[in-house]
Amino acid sequence: MAEAARKLDTIDVRPAYTQADADVLNARFVGVDTLEMLRAVFAEKLLGRTAVVSSFGTESAVLLDLIARVDPTVPVVFVDTLKMFPETERYRVQLLDRLGMANRDVVTPDPAALEAKDATGLRWSYDPDGCCAIRKVEPLARAKQGLDSWISGRKAFQSQTRANIPRFEIEDGRLKMNPLGDWVKADLEAYFAERELPRHPLEAEGYLSIGCQPCTSVVKPGEDPRAGRWRGWDKTECGIHTDNVSELPSF
């Protein structure tokens, strides 16, 4: 059959990154110092359009300081669920001012979704998964539109559900970088001391992992650092680190 005189125009809808890309990066940077890795990644523009996502919790200052040392113009995304501690908001401003990071993006829940599914503001008390889907997962998905990659502060030691976190992984067609995936608590503490970074004001009160105010409690001695999140529920993650967005709770 003769080839058509004019080929049909097609749109390339393949993901910007594939698992093979993540595998190559993981192999290249195995054993490489985190700051050295970040300098190489940004110098070679390996992330495309990217942003760092921060909860501004008790350990967030480490990742943000590392990024600021390499490129302080990187956008910093914060999901304000409208249920956050006021101390977290004050800490966010203080920390970013200190680090000289002026490219700040605050994303909030969709008002229509709140009105339809959480008009009382109490969904957290009977359906925490649904509450997270409305207030955290959907807003972050919106914020990531147009990005080729994003930078996460997850660390393997934080809980059993976060074990074996690679430095690079693929999530919904985007490259996700976890620069602190192999850091342990002692590494973080040493970095805080070396860089004289400010602490979240609630850490001294026993809040070792800080999220929304209604679903965050003090961690007791000997407990997992994330034991204070969603206490009493069979829930360990808000949903933003779920591999497949189709598996997230509907709202």
Image (spheres, rainbow, N blue to C red):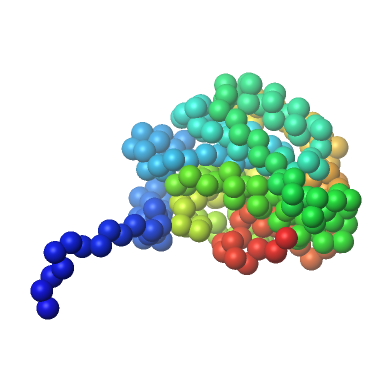
Residue 208 figure quarter: top right
The location of residue 249, given as percent across then percent down, is 70, 64
Q: Is residue 197 depicted above or below 214 in this figure?
A: above
Quadrant including the C terminus: bottom right
The location of residue 105, given as percent across then percent down, is 61, 34
Residue at x 69% of width, y 26% of height:
93
The location of residue 202, given as percent across then percent down, is 81, 35
Residue at x 46% of width, y 36% of height:
35
Q: Is residue 208 depicted above or below 198 in this figure?
A: below
Please state which of residues 118 and 95 is positioned toward the viewer in this rendering.
118
Residue at x 39% of width, y 48% of height:
29
Residue at x 41% of width, y 61% of height:
19
> Would residue 96 be seen by someone viewing this image from the given angle?
yes
Residue that protrudes farthest toward the left in the picture: 2
Q: Is residue 9 left or right of residue 80?
A: left
Quadrant including the N terminus: bottom left
> Would residue 229 be seen by someone viewing this image from the given angle?
no
Please state which of residues 250 and 98 is positioned toward the viewer in this rendering.
250
Q: Is residue 81 left or right of residue 63?
A: right
Q: Is residue 76 depicted above or below 174 in this figure?
A: above
